Amino acid sequence: MVTAAEILSVAAFDEGRRAQAFPSFGSERTGAPVVSFCRIDDREIRTREPVMEPDAVIIQDVTLIHQVDLFSGLSKDGYVLVNTSRAFDELGFGDFFDKFRPERLMTCPATEFALEHVGRPLPNAALLGGFAALTGQITMEAIDKAVRERFAGLVGERNVAAAAAAFSYVTSKEEELTRASTN
């Protein structure tokens, strides 16, 4: 997620916005959970503090959901994107997400897209494509450009394909939800 936050900040910067990305490491051991932050604004960003009230949360590893308080500070208007093929009601939260806006909650099988397009279980780019579709805060074109800047050649092309697949997936799921809510 450190790389994903960096790519997201580059994409925002390329769109003329201010951006800042930085990780926060817990215990310094291999396999320990890592939290990464990305701030995007139209004005200069002066703070360097951790993000205590995020507007969006992207969860790369679904196994962390019940181990770490991933939703601390997230308002009911926040966005949540989870890397899983399971639905929110299958994740064991009961009615926790009832207070959130359903159109801002999405699961996306980003690891599956990464395996299909990249050949490895590295879902960062796919999650960014899903984030772009879910929030509309960044364009897919900016994600595409930033991924290609980060990863040259075939690796970049494959990551862009994974991001585009996730973008299409989230877009189609949003359309399904819109149709279901109007019926």
Image: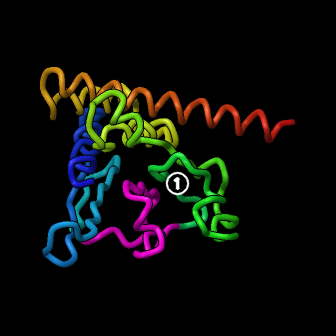
Pick the front one: 163 or 61: 61
| 63 in relation to 18, above or below | below
Left or right: residue 66 versus residue 76 is: left
Q: Nearer the viewer, residue 43 or 97?
A: 97
Report how many numbered discs are placed on residues in the image: 1
| Residue on which disc 1 sits | 79
- Hey, which quadrant is residue 31 in on the image? bottom left
What span is in magenta?
A: 49-74
Residue 175, horizontal then vertical, whole percent? 67, 31
Q: Tag 1: residue type?
A: Tyr
Q: Position of residue 169 (x, y in %)?
A: 53, 32
Q: Is residue 127 left or right of residue 20?
A: right
Helix, strand or loop: magenta stretch: loop
The residue sitting at 53% across, 48% down in the picture is 107
**Residue 110 painted magenta:** no
Q: On the picture, is 54 further left or further right than 47? A: right
Residue farthest to the bottom, as pictured: 27
Figure check: 20 above or below 165: below
Disc 1 on helix, strand or loop?
Answer: strand
Residue 20, picture quadrant: bottom left
Looking at the picture, tell me which residue is in the foreground, 13 or 84. Answer: 84
Residue visible at 23% across and 70% down?
32
- Where, quadrant-wise, is the C terminus in this rendering? top right
168 up-or-down from 80: above or below = above
Residue at the location (46% across, 68% down)?
65
Q: Position of residue 106 (x, y in %)?
A: 56, 48
Q: Is residue 54 magenta?
A: yes
Tell me how the rendering is colored. Answer: rainbow
Horizontal and vertical percent position of residue 147: 23, 32
**Local crowd size for mark 1, using a 10 Å CA cut-off: few (<14), some (14–19), many (≥20):** many
- Quarter of image, res 98: bottom right
